[in-house]
Amino acid sequence: MRHLLSAADLGRAETIQILDLAEEMAQVQARPVKKLPALRGRTVVNLFFEDSTRTRSSFELAGKWLSADVINISAKGSSVSKGESLRDTVLTVAAMGVDALVIRHHASGAPAQVRRWFEEGGIDAHVLNAGDGTHEHPTQALLDAFTLRRHFRVAEPDRNSFEGRVVVIAGDVTHSRVARSNVLLLRTLGAEVVLVAPPTLMPSGVETWPVATSNDLDEVLPEADAVMMLRVQRERMSGGYFPTPREYTHRYGLTRERLTRLKPGAAICHPGPMNRGLEISADAADAANSLILDQVAAGVAVRMSVLYELLGGGDN
Ligand code: CP
């Protein structure tokens, strides 16, 4: 793997290798001294054109715990705010001699365009997609798979973790890069995926995706081994996608009442940030079977694993 732009870049064996290595990285995360020398002398730049709490800080920790030099650049406070173009910005950063560029951008396809500019310019840096518009968020899908694999293994150690498991992904699917990457990766791992959304928030062309779909959350919840609630992305909505927030919660929120429809032990996930009281209730977010903080913790271990795989830590 040279770049990580899409969950589709990962085959089953490669995904499992990243998840297995992340288990080892998680052991480092649990130590008092969280440091490995694997990426000493390598430089990672986190270039964020959109806000982030989890992804940016976990990529930063992942790089630092592997002893890479890590620089964070956000659009606010950089020359982007003076009108510098994306192309000029990334070529400027690359000219300093970076080994990996982690990029979050509001435009779908921006990381792929950066990879093309690097290839045209003979620039030997790896590109990692940290979320591009409504397109993809592949490391989020990896950390979700890591978290779910652990959960399924504890419940049934002798069973293949994903084969035959039903993962319900519910909410604002149209605007969700998390949903797109998760569909690809969960299918690669053998899980069945059911997407649930109001008709207005189900993407056009979804019938060609390898998933089942429903507009009725109550109907599908009893089948779920895991339910992944998606954030309602009001900042990407230009029109009225649902009558009122109250109506949305009534039909599509994981409310206290809906928790009773889940199988015992079914996992509750959310990529964050959450709109508590809209797509997920406090009872669900803080339930015993909620894995939301496990997902956050997994973000560091998984991103350590990905950086290690991409930057050739294995050669050290
Ligand atoms: N899940 C996720 O991408 O969160 P951030 O926007 O905080 O990075």
Image (cartoon, rainbow, N blue to C red):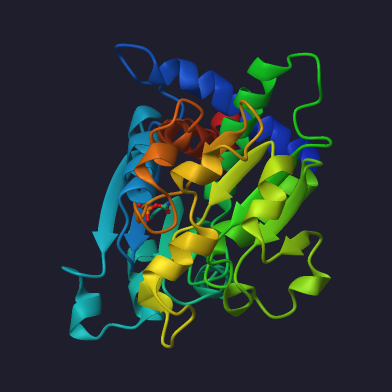
Q: Position of residue 175 (x, y in %)?
A: 52, 71
Q: Quadrant of residue 95?
A: bottom left
Q: Residue drawn at (33%, 36%), measured in percent from left and top? A: 61
* Residue sitting nearer the eye, 46 or 195: 195
* Residue sitting nearer the eye, 281 or 272: 281
Q: Residue drawn at (56%, 32%), measured in percent from left and top? A: 147
Q: Is residue 9 visible?
A: no
* Residue sitting nearer the eye, 132 or 4: 132
Q: Is residue 94 left or right of residue 179?
A: left
Q: Residue drawn at (65%, 61%), measured in percent from left and top? A: 196
Q: Position of residue 105 (x, y in %)?
A: 41, 69
Rendered-image quadrant of the C terminus: top right
Q: Residue drawn at (64%, 76%), measured in percent from left and top? A: 199
Q: Quadrant of residue 223?
A: top right
Q: Is residue 235 visible?
A: yes
Vertical placement of residue 178 versus 239, above or below: above
Vertical placement of residue 217 versus 105, above or below: above
Q: How many marks?
A: 0
* Residue sitting nearer the eye, 115 or 174: 174
Q: Residue furthest top?
A: 32
Q: Is residue 245 left or right of residue 16?
A: left
Q: Is residue 122 left or right of residue 102?
A: right
Q: Position of residue 155 (x, y in %)?
A: 67, 18
Q: Position of residue 257 (x, y in %)?
A: 50, 44
